[in-house]
Amino acid sequence: MVRVLVNAVVVKDNKILVIKRSLKEKHAPGKWSVPGGSLEIEEGHYVLENTARREVFEETGIKIKPKMELLVNNIFHHTEDKEPVLAIVFFCQYDSGEIKVDKSEITEARWIKEEDLNSLEFNHPNVKNYIKKGFQRASEISTTS
């Protein structure tokens, strides 16, 4: 069985939204990541996009614009239990809201600039690469606007 993980790289004013995982979390406690979570089986269309939208809002209080694009997808084995995980990462744009965190899952959320990337310890090397790709995509969009 492959677990499906849906993440969102959310951009606002050339900054990307990151979250710090709670110390109570089983996987990568106290490490930085991007909003996201496991796909929950639900009926209907656009379950991946709906999962991204729901996870961003639940974890940070931020709403993202309806249009999102696939940024990257990859498969890896979970560190703790070696379970295969398919990660689907969307590039999303901020729509509205102020950061509010539910302290049970995450302890902090913030918007970072590209130069802040090396000062944070991420839960997996892939996450840093997702964020780099997000900054690259944001740059492409701003040069064509």
Image (cartoon, grey):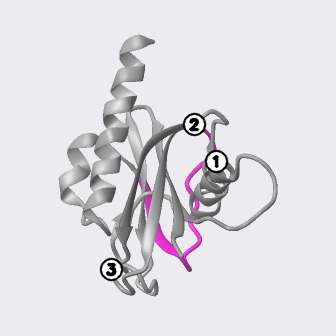
* Camera-nearest residue between 76 and 138: 76
Q: Position of residue 12 (x, y in %)?
A: 47, 36
Residue at 40 percent of width and 84 percent of height: 23
Do the CB atoms of the residues marked 2 and 1 lie less than 8 Å apart? yes
Highlighted magenta segment, given as a residue range: 93-110
- The residue that mark 1 highlights is 49
Precedes in sequence: disc 3 or disc 2: 2
Q: Is residue 67 above or below residue 85?
A: above
Left or right placement of residue 61 versus residue 92 in this view: right
Q: Is residue 109 magenta?
A: yes
In the rendered view of the protein, which quadrant contains the N terminus? Answer: bottom right
Under mark 1, the amino acid is: Glu
Q: Earlier in the sequence, mark 2 or mark 1?
A: 1
Q: CA distance from mark 1 to mark 3?
A: 26 Å
Quadrant location of residue 31?
bottom left
**In the image, is residue 102 part of the stretch drawn in magenta?**
yes
Mark 3: secondary structure: loop
Q: Which residue is mark 3?
A: 79
